Image (cartoon, coloured by chain):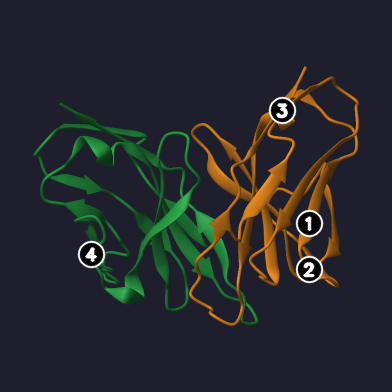
Amino acid sequence: AQRVTQPEKLLSVFKGAPVELKCNYSYSGSPELFWYVQYSRQRLQLLLRHISRESIKGFTADLNKGETSFHLKKPFAQEEDSAMYYCALASYGGATNKLIFGTGTLLAVQP
Amino acid sequence: DADVTQTPRNRITKTGKRIMLECSQTKGHDRMYWYRQDPGLGLRLIYYSFDVKDINKGEISDGYSVSRQAQAKFSLSLESAIPNQTALYFCATSDFLSNTGELFFGEGSRLTVL
């Protein structure tokens, strides 16, 4: 079964501390994974996708097929990073791009 | 500005009432989706549509129906609302041609069923 697991509902860190938001997936094919972010009073939006291998707002995420993980990392957290983060898996069946979301992790960065 | 717009933004209703949530988009995307967001459960897919003549059930379609009136419009209906349908509902769109997997979300419709 296709599944995305985010084990932490809440992650609280201090400003300047490293951040790692965990994401594990279950998928029989070649996965495409994404991180979406929802800032307070804003729309859910794409943060980054694994195929781009990019760093956005200092965040990076590496796909580890052996561990079936796609953890989101940032070396030094900022207060403006406080938001809800969702890991998502693209489920393909006939050239579709339906996304399966995890349950989300609320990141709270304390001053 | 090209956008995804949901109406109403907030709605309180009673058990047994029929409710329609509407979504319109000016992005020119062919694909549209309805998700619901519940605390601790994340976003779950209700229905999705890849073009006007294509409607597909998601993981939690029971109690819901949809209508794709045009490429730009995708409505979600609750024929007889019940309290456990209280949630935040999101419409989203994507573009098949770009095939990047990116979804563009509306601002959400908060529904409360008493």
The residues bearing labels 4 and 1 have C-alpha atoms spaced at a distance of 34 Å
Q: In the displayed structure, does residue B69 sit left or right of residue B85?
A: right
Give the alpha-carbon distance from disc 3 to disc 1, as whole Å: 22 Å
Task: Find disc 4 in the rendering and name its residue.
Answer: A55
Q: Amino acid at mark 2?
A: Gln
Which label belongs to residue A80? none
Mark 3 or 1: in front is 1
| Chain ID of residue with mark 4 | A
Q: CA distance from mark 2 to mark 4?
A: 34 Å
Q: Secondary structure at mark 3?
A: helix
Q: SS for tag 1?
A: strand
- The kind of secondary structure element at disc 4 is loop
Residue pointed to by mark 2: B71
Q: Based on the displayed image, in which of its 4 quarters is residue B109 positioned?
A: top right
Q: Give how far apart the Cα atoms at labels 3 and 4 are.
A: 39 Å
Q: Nearer the viewer, residue A5 or A85?
A: A85
What percent of the width, then of the height, locates residue B108?
Answer: 62, 40
Specify few, some or many for label 3: CA neighbours under 10 Å numbering under 14, 14-19, or 20 or more: few
Q: Position of residue A79 (x, y in %)?
A: 21, 35
Q: Quadrant of residue B38?
A: top right
Give chain A's shade.
Answer: green
Q: Are marks 3 and 1 on the same chain?
A: yes
- Numbered tag placed on residue B84 in the rendering: 3
- Locate residue B79, reporting x and y percent: 90, 38
Badge 3 amino acid: Asn
Label 3 marks a residue whose chain is B
Q: Which residue is mark 1?
A: B74
Asked if both marks, 3 and 4, belong to the same chain, the answer given is no
Above or below for A19 versus B69: above
SS state under label 2? loop
Q: Residue at x 81, y 51 (%)?
A: B75
